[in-house]
Image (cartoon, rainbow, N blue to C red):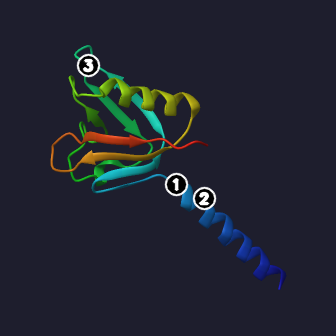
Amino acid sequence: MKSFKSLLLSLLCFSSFAAFAGVCVPDHCSNVYIERLYVEASGKIFIGTSGDEKILNCNAASGVYEIIPAGTPGADLLYSTLLTAQTTNSPIGVLQVDDNLPGCVVQYITLDKK
């Protein structure tokens, strides 16, 4: 009986960690951390997350980055959200990309209160 309880506790712990693990699917990444922000002088923003961008259907830039192209309306607001998430070590709820455009162009980002 004691080993059954230990096994059950182990499974519960594992499943709770798995529920919070970041994941990418063909059109977005969810519950991921911002690991790298790379900004070019032109204004183009590259976003590296804790997820696997190779799973996205949009051919991530250099195989690992979603992008916000220079001149994108609202780019400063998106970048501000990304900086907040990175600075506070908060996961991004959803990082939605347009899976029909090469480079994985960001459409929107959600950031939830911890």
Residue at the spot 55% in from the left edge and 61% down from the top edge: 19
Residue closest to the eye, 21 or 7: 21
Disc 3 on helix, strand or loop?
loop
- The picture places residue 114, in percent across and down from the top left corner, at 61, 43
Task: Give the side of residue 9 with respect to residue 15, left or right.
Answer: right
Q: State the residue lying farthest toward the top.
A: 41
Which-is-in-front pick, marks 1 and 3?
A: 3
Q: Quadrant of residue 4?
A: bottom right
Disc 2 on helix, strand or loop?
helix
Q: Quadrant of residue 64?
A: top left
Determine which residue is flagged by label 3: 43
- Total labels drawn: 3
Which-is-in-front pick, marks 2 and 3?
A: 3
Q: Is the residue under label 2 in contact with that under label 1 (CB below 8 Å)?
A: yes
Q: What's the CA distance linking mark 1 and mark 2?
A: 6 Å
Q: What's the CA distance linking mark 1 and mark 3?
A: 31 Å
Kind of residue at disc 1: Ala
Task: Give the side of residue 35 with respect to residue 103, left or right.
Answer: right
Q: Residues within 10 Å of mark 3 (few under 14, many from 20)?
A: some
- The picture places residue 78, in percent across and down from the top left corner, at 36, 31
Up-down: is 95 above or below 41? below
Kind of residue at disc 2: Phe
- The picture places residue 111, in percent across and down from the top left corner, at 48, 41
Determine which residue is flagged by label 2: 17
Task: Give the side of residue 84 with respect to residue 55, left or right.
Answer: right
Residue at the spot 53% in from the left edge and 44% down from the top edge: 112
Question: Which numbered marker is on residue 4?
Answer: none
Disc 1 on helix, strand or loop?
loop
- The picture places residue 21, in percent across and down from the top left corner, at 52, 54
Q: State the residue lying farthest toward the right.
A: 2
Question: Which numbered marker is on residue 21?
Answer: 1
Q: Is the residue under label 3 in contact with that under label 2 (CB below 8 Å)?
A: no
